[in-house]
Structures are given as C-alpha cells and as structure tokens.
Image (cartoon, rainbow, N blue to C red):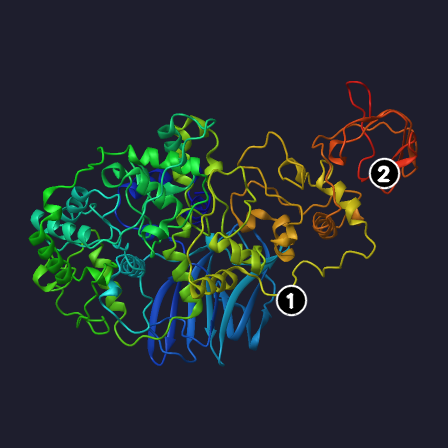
C-alpha cells in the first residue's frame, strides 16, 4: 500500500488530505469491481514483446531474469535469434546515483527516461555495466532491449547505488501502464486451461500435460456411495458453479449419477485402511477441538476451505466443510499417513505429523457434515445399474483424467487449438453438454479468458524451455498459496483470520506463516535447495512454527526443472561488478572467533536477541521476529547471500522484521562493516564457536588497564554444558586481552574450562562466579 501511495502521489501530485480521500475511494471501488488489477494506473509487471521472423507475441513478465539456453523464449515462437523488448515504470524510492548492470549472452540496451544508461554485448554469458545516472524520486519509464546473437540466450537485469551493491531489479518496483488487461486475461485463461486439465483431451505436441485427476482405483473403500452419486449429479445443476471447481458437467440425471457411482464402487480394487492407534494417555481428550486447531494452524487452509476459512485456488484441494459425509475416519487417517496407498497419483503433499495429530485431524474432519452412512443403498449392487454406469463412464471418457480399473481413455479426434475456433457452440465452453457425444461443459471457468488464451495459441508450438517448465511446476504445485514471493502474499491473510478467532494463536499469526521464498534460489546451496523443494529435510530449522514444509512427489525431471527455475530467477551470477568500493578480503590472522563473539552479542549486531545459535535459544522472542539457527549456517546458506542479506534484508524481502547492518560496530576490525559481517560468517561456521549467552548489555567493573590480564581467585560454578554444574571452590581464573579465558581447578591442578568471549560474571545470589 505504501508503494501504491507513492505512485499516486507522484503521478497526480495532490496534497496529503486529497490523496488519502482518493486512496479510500479507489480501495472501495476495487472491492466492488470484478476486474483484475489492470484497473490500477500502474499494475505490477513488465510488458514483454518477443519477435522472430515477423511474428510478435506479448505477455506480462514479473521480472527480467531469464536463461533460455537454445530454446525459444515463448512456445508460440520458433527457435532462433529472436529480439525482445520489455516496457515498464520503475519506481525510484530514493533520489541518488544508480548504475545498471546486465548479465547477458547477446546484445542488450537499457533506456531510462529515454536515455540510454547501458549498452553492450557478450558472446558468452557475462557482465555488462552502464554509466552512473542520477535518478530522482518517482516513476521512471524503463525499456530493456535484447537481441539473441548466438546459440544461447541469457538476460538478467540488475542495478546498484551508493547504498547497496548489485541487486536484481525488484519486482515490487516494476509496474506497467494500464491498457493491457487482455494480456492478464490470457494468462488467467492459461492457468484455468491447465487447472481444468483441458489438455488431457485436447492433446497437442509440445504441451505441458496437466496432472491427472484423483485415481478412482479404490473409490469404494471408506467412501459414502450416496455422497459420490450426489456429487456427480450436482455438477449438472444450472448455476452450480461451486459444486466442484475442476470437474465439468455432463448433464447427468440422478439415475445416471447413481449408475456411474455404482459402477465405480463395483470396479474398485481392494485396499486395507490403516487402523487408528490408541489415544495416548497424555494426549488431550478433546480430539475434535485439537483437530480443528491443527487444520487451521498447520497450513491446510492454504489449499482447502473449511466453512468460511481457507482458499482452494486453481491448484488447491477440495472444500472439506462436509468431509464427514464423504469419508470414514479410518480413510482420512490412512490418507494423512499413506496417501499413495489410496491414490498413486495424488497431488497433495505428505505432511510430517505424529499419529496423535493424525488421530486428532481425522476426528475433526469426521465430525464435519452429516454422520457417515455405513449401509450402502440398494442401487449400489444392482447389476443393470452397474452395467449402465460403465457405458456412461465410457461415453464421458472419464478415463482421460481419472485412472479407473479396466477402463482406458478413448483417443478422440478433437481440435488441438492450433487453428482458430470459428464456432464455440459445439465446444466444452457452450451452454449445454452433450452426453451422447461425450462433450461436457465447464460452468466455473472464465470463458472469455480461456477463449482469448486459445486464440493467442493459434499456430505451431515450440518445446518449452527448462525455465518455462520450472515456472509451470512452481505454479501447479501451488507454492505461493503458502509462501510469500515477489508480489505474492502467501497465506498471510488466512493466518490473520485464524489468529483473530483461535485463542491459542491470538497475537501469534506469524507462527502460521512459512518463510518467504523471495531470492530462495540465491539463498540456499544447491544441495539444500534440492532438499527443501521436495520437503526432504531431516529436521525443521524453524521448530516454533506451526506450519511445516510437506514432502512433495516430484518426478526427477520436475525437480530438475524447478531447481533450474529458482536458481536462474534468483541467483546473482559470480564475479558481479561492484558499485560502492573494491572489497578488500578480511585480513589473514583475524581472530574470527573472538570478533564473532563480540559482534553477535548485544554490543555488536545483537544476533542473539532473535536467533538460535548452537544450544543457545533467545527467550521471550515474538514469533514474527524469531530467527533461524545460525550455527554452521554455511551448510545450507550461500556466503554470497549471507553477505547480501545482512547488509539489507528489506531489499530482498520487503517488510522483513530484521534490521540491516551497513553501519559498522565502532572499535572492531578498523570499523569496516564488510570485514565485520565476514568475521561473523567465519565464526558461525566454526564448530568451536560459542555465542554469548546474555542478550543484555551489562556494566563491567575492571580494576586493570585495557588488554591487561585479569585474574580472579574465588568460587566458580562449572557450567552444566561442560558436564557438571558443581562449584569449584579452589579456582584460578585468567582472562586475557584477546578474550581467551582459562579456568583452573587448583584442588586437582587441572584445566576445567577454556572459553572465548567475556571473561566472567558474578551471580547476584551467592556471589559465586
């Protein structure tokens, strides 16, 4: 909203009072409007035009960061030496001097306010930097031109200024002129075409095939037959656009629906449902209440709805508000524990839950809706009904989307949309279905958007690039339903709604919000990124969150594509140019353990106020400000990202509740902030490092001069972390000026402790040390 106010204030230059009135009016109009954000003067995104051989195609890109290799930048264009142009408004929040950079293979030109600020080329992927340019506050017209000149095509745009080194152009500061609503509708149509699995019947070469619908192999076990028939029938009711988001209507009557359900129940393959384990004695007795809290807090509502809470979206799951009508508790428990047992082609990821939590969730879901009907209706076992149901299933070609025992999908001579559609009246977007021809209708789709999308796809298709395939996987896995990334807000709104009604989470909405995925491809090492995109990590690094990353069933190819997309989109290539100054390496011999101890403590960057380091855990830290485990952080996080992040987290994740550390801590490492951040990195990745354990700044009383040796002969308490908390009555403690400290036990003439950092502190009670 702040960015929006900035844009409006600069665009129309009104007084503050008038601006607030305008803002309120626009907000109210936006709530009443059915249109998308194209109604805004400057919607987010960049208008991209790709051209080859006299043919041009357009779309909205969120940022300019691509590596197409030898592939086409858009499947609508053939492979070859294409040209591209991006147009947008770049929001400048700070009036200063900037420099633009490009990592490019080919020719590139960047124009700001009709002035060329960068022009260059690279035969092999490499850096090109422009001249310094002074930009004042407000929106500036931005154009980026690119020409592929060789076998491969690479382009990533960056900038830098006196206050920050090379950073990608942030998507939240890129906007385009109004008037491109058709491009937004085309993208909406594309997503609906994929989500509704249209391409499983309308088969086309070089198409990214949608995932199949739920397998019906075991549909009869733990499933209410009356519910199944009612669901099939409800699809055909006029105006019932919410009966099921993805399935079409074939115009089936109640008798037809019962026949289909009877056949599906009869063709099922046997499966043994898991038995519910006994409730543990220490577990809460009210399992329904605990299950309600679980489903609201652990992330389920990012993809499912229950009552007025949650969101299904195009790539989410079902409405669970009446799950008790549909399934038995044993079926729900089995699904939560071993979904592959019930559906080998399941899309839903597997969550890490204890058996107790599965008991609680299944108890809550079983309690939703009417009691499950255990006795099957008579029509289920009617042989004529079953036979008729099979014919209906074949007629509707249900196997095109669903796996059904002994039923194969029919190959149909349907249009692949490579040619224009002159008459939509005999299509799936017509008003009435035709069951005899096996042609359904989709009541819940935006027909205009799908038609415009298909019109934009006329002609031959090229193979999708690996980058495009990765973006497709990221979209269909519904990652941004949970996570923030770029302009996406993830499940923030849902978390706020739950925190308002659940006493256990009042004031703790951040505990239900997973980490942002902005720049995650730059943040994580390759092996860590591969673990996290599949949810294959062994231990959560944010155990205080109620949400958790589930395990996803990616294919080998999908995982490779997803990793490629995240790394290409996010990662700053090596050997980046420097804007501010030449970075001088941390001097050799720097005592990183000593310096790190001082810098992570309260007199330095105060990392221990929010972050867990080793066995140390900060106390009384709000979930929204609590940080991840920092000890040995280099095992998962790239050093380049750490240095970038610590300087300015807000440039990477807007709204992040962590300060930037560009100002050095006085008196350490020649007041060089880069050296100080690197010293912290080195210390955190040294297994010998021990953080200060007191986040408070304390007064010190020292009777010797600075850097002189300090000696204490008194009673000391040996810390429990050293194996004992017994006192040492005959102690001899020495503190050196380099912060190395030794504790000797004179009763046995041995060294009991060697620490690095603060020397000693006296307890208030007992006056021991």
Q: Nearer the viewer, residue 57 or 237?
A: 237
Q: In which quarter of the image is the C terminus?
A: top right
In the rendered image, the vertical position of residue 179 relative to residue 49, given as above or below: above
Q: Position of residue 748 (x, y in %)?
A: 91, 32
> Which quadrant of the structure image shows residue 429?
bottom left
Name which quarter of the figure residue 375 lies in.
top left
Q: Pick whichever, 677 or 277, lies toward us.
A: 277
Q: Which of marks 2 and 1 is in front?
A: 2
**Residue 298 percent across, percent down from the top left:** 43, 39
Would you name the residue on which mark 1 appears? 575
The residue wearing badge 2 is: 741
Answer with left or right where residue 202 lies relative to residue 378: right
Q: Is mark 1 on a helix, strand or loop?
A: loop
Q: How crowded is mark 1: few (under 14 residues within 10 Å), some or many (20 or more)?
A: few
Q: Residues within 10 Å of mark 2 (few under 14, many from 20)?
A: many
* In this view, 563 is above or below 652: below
Label located before the other in sequence (2 or 1): 1
Label placed on residue 593: none
- Is label 2 in a helix, a strand or a loop? strand
Residue 513, given in percent of the width and then of the height, sits at 46, 41
């Amino acid at each position: 909203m702040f960015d929006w106010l900035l844009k409006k204030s600069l665009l129309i230059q009104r007084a503050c009072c008038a601006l607030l009135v305008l803002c309120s009016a626009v907000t109210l109009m936006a709530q009443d409007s059915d249109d998308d954000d194209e109604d805004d003067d400057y919607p987010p995104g960049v208008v991209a035009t790709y051209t080859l051989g006299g043919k041009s195609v357009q779309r909205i890109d969120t940022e300019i960061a691509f590596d197409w290799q030898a592939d086409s930048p858009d499947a609508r264009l053939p492979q070859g030496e294409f040209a591209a142009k991006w147009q947008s408004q770049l929001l400048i929040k700070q009036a200063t001097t900037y420099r633009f950079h490009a990592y490019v293979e080919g020719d590139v030109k960047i124009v700001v306010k009709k002035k060329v600020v960068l022009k260059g080329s690279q035969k092999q992927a490499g850096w090109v930097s422009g001249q310094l340019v002074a930009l004042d506050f407000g929106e500036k017209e931005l154009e980026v031109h690119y020409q592929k000149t060789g076998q491969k095509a690479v382009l990533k745009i960056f900038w830098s200024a006196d206050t920050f080194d090379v950073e990608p152009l942030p998507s939240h500061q890129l906007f385009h002129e109004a008037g491109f609503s058709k491009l937004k509708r085309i993208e909406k149509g594309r997503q609906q075409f994929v989500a509704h699995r249209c391409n499983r019947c309308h088969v086309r070469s070089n198409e990214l095939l949608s995932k199949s619908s739920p397998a019906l192999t075991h549909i009869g076990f733990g499933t209410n037959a009356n519910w199944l028939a009612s669901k099939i029938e409800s699809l055909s009711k006029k105006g019932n656009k919410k009966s099921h988001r993805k399935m079409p209507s074939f115009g089936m009557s109640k008798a037809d629906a019962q026949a289909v359900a009877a056949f599906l129940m009869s063709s099922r393959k046997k499966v043994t449902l898991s038995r519910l384990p006994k409730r543990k004695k220490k577990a809460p007795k009210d399992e329904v209440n605990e299950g309600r809290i679980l489903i609201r807090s652990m992330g389920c509502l990012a993809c499912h709805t229950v009552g007025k809470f949650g969101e299904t979206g195009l790539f989410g799951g079902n409405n669970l508000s009446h799950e008790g009508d549909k399934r038995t508790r044993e079926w729900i428990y089995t699904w939560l524990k071993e979904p592959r047992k019930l559906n080998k082609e399941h899309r839903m990821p597997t969550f890490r839950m204890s058996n107790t939590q599965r008991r609680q969730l299944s108890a809550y879901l079983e309690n939703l809706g009417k009691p499950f009907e255990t006795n099957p209706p008579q029509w289920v076992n009617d042989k004529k009904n079953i036979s008729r149901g099979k014919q209906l299933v074949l007629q509707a070609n249900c196997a095109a989307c669903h796996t059904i025992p002994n039923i194969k999908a029919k190959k149909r001579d349907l249009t692949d949309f490579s040619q224009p559609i002159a008459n939509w009246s005999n299509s799936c977007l017509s008003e009435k279905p035709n069951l005899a021809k096996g042609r359904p209708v989709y009541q819940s789709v935006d027909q205009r958007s799908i038609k415009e999308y298909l019109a934009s796809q006329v002609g031959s298709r090229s193979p999708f690039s690996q980058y495009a395939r990765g973006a497709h996987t990221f979209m269909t896995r519904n990652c941004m339903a949970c996570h923030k990334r770029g302009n996406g807000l993830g499940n923030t709104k849902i978390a706020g709604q739950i925190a308002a009604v659940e006493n256990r989470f009042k004031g703790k909405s951040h505990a239900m919000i997973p980490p942002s995925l902005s720049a995650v491809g730059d943040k994580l090492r390759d092996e860590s990124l591969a673990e996290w995109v599949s949810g294959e990590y062994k231990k959560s690094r944010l155990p205080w969150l109620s949400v958790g990353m589930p395990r996803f069933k990616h294919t080998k190819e999908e995982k490779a594509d997803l990793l490629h997309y995240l790394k290409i989109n996010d990662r700053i290539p090596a050997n980046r140019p420097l804007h501010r100054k030449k970075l001088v390496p941390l001097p050799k011999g720097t005592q990183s353990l000593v310096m790190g101890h001082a810098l992570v403590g309260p007199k330095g960057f105060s990392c221990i106020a929010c972050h867990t380091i080793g066995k140390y855990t900060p106390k009384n830290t709000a979930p929204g400000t609590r940080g991840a485990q920092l000890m040995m952080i280099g095992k998962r996080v790239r050093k380049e990202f750490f240095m970038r992040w610590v300087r300015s987290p807000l440039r990477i994740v807007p709204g992040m509740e962590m300060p930037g550390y560009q100002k050095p801590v006085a008196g350490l490492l020649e007041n060089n902030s880069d050296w100080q951040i690197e010293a912290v990195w080195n210390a955190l990745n040294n297994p010998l490092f021990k953080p200060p354990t007191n986040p408070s700044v304390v007064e010190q009383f020292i009777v010797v001069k600075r850097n002189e040796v300090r000696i204490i002969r008194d009673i000391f308490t040996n810390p429990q972390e050293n194996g004992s908390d017994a006192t040492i009555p005959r102690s001899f403690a020495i503190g050196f000026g380099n912060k190395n400290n030794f504790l000797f036990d004179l009763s046995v003439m041995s060294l009991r402790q060697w620490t690095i950092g603060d020397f000693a502190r006296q307890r208030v009670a007992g006056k021991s040390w």
